[in-house]
Amino acid sequence: MDKLDDCFGKGLLRPGRKQPDLAVKDLAQARFFLAEAEDLLGRGKRVMASLALYNAYFHIVRALLFKDGYTERSHYCLARYLEERYVKEKTLDSRLLDAFETIMSVRHNAQYSTDAVEIEEDLGELSARCATLIERVEALLKKAR
């Protein structure tokens, strides 16, 4: 059984109905969080910027689920969905999945660490890839309507 099947089998991803209006709203949330992340980066607030940047990615990928008619209960399973349904099918570039998984790891460390957090990843590059992902998903949403 592959990882995506496991996500469905455990109920961490569930089929539902397609909700294109929620997909559009999630994409707007992604834009909001990306702008917040960029503002925080500009002020040198890297840890908080990483949290906002993760939220941007989260909302982008969740928009795809709403477009396709699924709901999620696992951030890990969002990445597996993106990988199986969009990257492996060559609809989206694997570097966008890599960026999502990187910021997912950074966010986890920033949010749950009890020690001072040092972020070594290039948040500027992750932000740029996030903007690219927003553009690509927006095009997919328009194509689906």
Image (cartoon, rainbow, N blue to C red):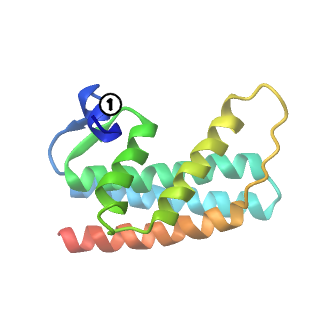
Q: Report the residue at 54% width, 64% height from top.
A: 130
85 to the left or right of 52: left
Amino acid on which disc 1 is placed: Leu
Q: Nearer the viewer, residue 71 or 122?
A: 122
Q: Find residue 15 and report its horizontal and vertical position in percent.
A: 18, 39
Q: Find residue 134 and report its horizontal and vertical position in percent.
A: 45, 67
Residue 19 visible, this orientation? no
Residue position for label 1: 12
Q: Nearer the viewer, residue 108 or 43?
A: 108
State the image quarter where residue 110 is shown: top right
97 to the left or right of 114: left
- Mark count: 1
Q: Report the residue at 40% width, 53% height from top.
A: 61
| Placement of the N terminus among the 4 image quadrants | top left
Q: Nearer the viewer, residue 15 or 66?
A: 15
Q: Report the residue at 29% width, 55% height from top.
A: 85
- Is residue 131 depicted above or below 101 in this figure? below
Residue 54 visible, this orientation? yes
Q: Find residue 23 and report its horizontal and vertical position in percent.
A: 30, 56
